Amino acid sequence: MNIVALALLFTVVGLGFGLVAAPTFSSVYRTVPGEAVAQATTTMFIVVQVSASFGVTMIGFLLSDADSQRFGAVFAILTVAAVAVATIGRLLPGRPDAA
């Protein structure tokens, strides 16, 4: 596998995480009662970190074969996952009303 292609793939994954994490945490701050914010954000941070680690590990595992032809399939899976997350993200509670 081309190392540049792999680096680009992980860059896209990182950017996707960055684009999803901030709005998700903002939604928690807006919808959780004040006394539960600390527990809610801690729990969410742990879930996000474990999920991200698992996802990167699985991608690395799928692409671990040096002669792998799976890059297209893995990229397609990531694309579908990104579209699903973006769609679900639109349903998060606490979105500010459009002015």
Image (spheres, helix red, strand yellow):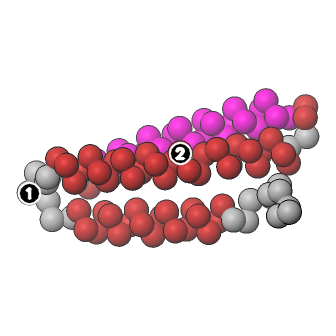
Viewer-proximal residue, 65 or 19?
19
Spatial CA distance of label 2 from label 1 is: 30 Å
**Residue tagged 1:** 67
Quadrant location, the C terminus:
bottom right
Residue at 42% from the left image edge and 66% from the top image edge: 79
Height in image: 74 above or below 47?
A: below
Looking at this view, name the residue that lies furthest to the front: 99
What amino acid is found at the position of numbered circle 2 in the picture? Gly
Residue at 14% from the left image edge and 52% from the top image edge: 2
Q: Is residue 44 magenta?
A: yes
Residue at 66% from the left image edge and 61% from the top image edge: 89
Residue at 91% from the left image edge and 40% from the top image edge: 33
Other-residue count near label 1 (Cα within 10 Å), few / some / many at <14 / 14–19 / ≥20: few
Q: Secondary structure at mark 2?
A: helix
**Does the image show residue 75?**
yes
Viewer-proximal residue, 18 or 36?
18
Secondary structure predominantly adopted by residues drawn in magenta: helix
**Residue tagged 2:** 18
Spot occupied by residue 65 in the image (x, y as percentages of width and height): 14, 52
Q: Which residues are magenta?
A: 36-60
Q: Is residue 12 left or right of residue 4?
A: right
Spot occupied by residue 7 in the image (x, y as percentages of width and height): 26, 46
Q: Is residue 29 magenta?
A: no
Quadrant location, the N terminus:
bottom left
What amino acid is found at the position of numbered circle 1 in the picture? Asp
Check if mark 2's residue and mark 1's residue have beta carbons within 8 Å.
no
Q: Is residue 81 left or right of residue 92?
A: left
Height in image: 62 above or below 34?
A: below
Marks 2 and 1: which is nearer the front?
2
**Does the image show residue 55?**
no
Spot occupied by residue 85 in the image (x, y as percentages of width and height): 57, 62
Other-residue count near label 2 (Cα within 10 Å), few / some / many at <14 / 14–19 / ≥20: few
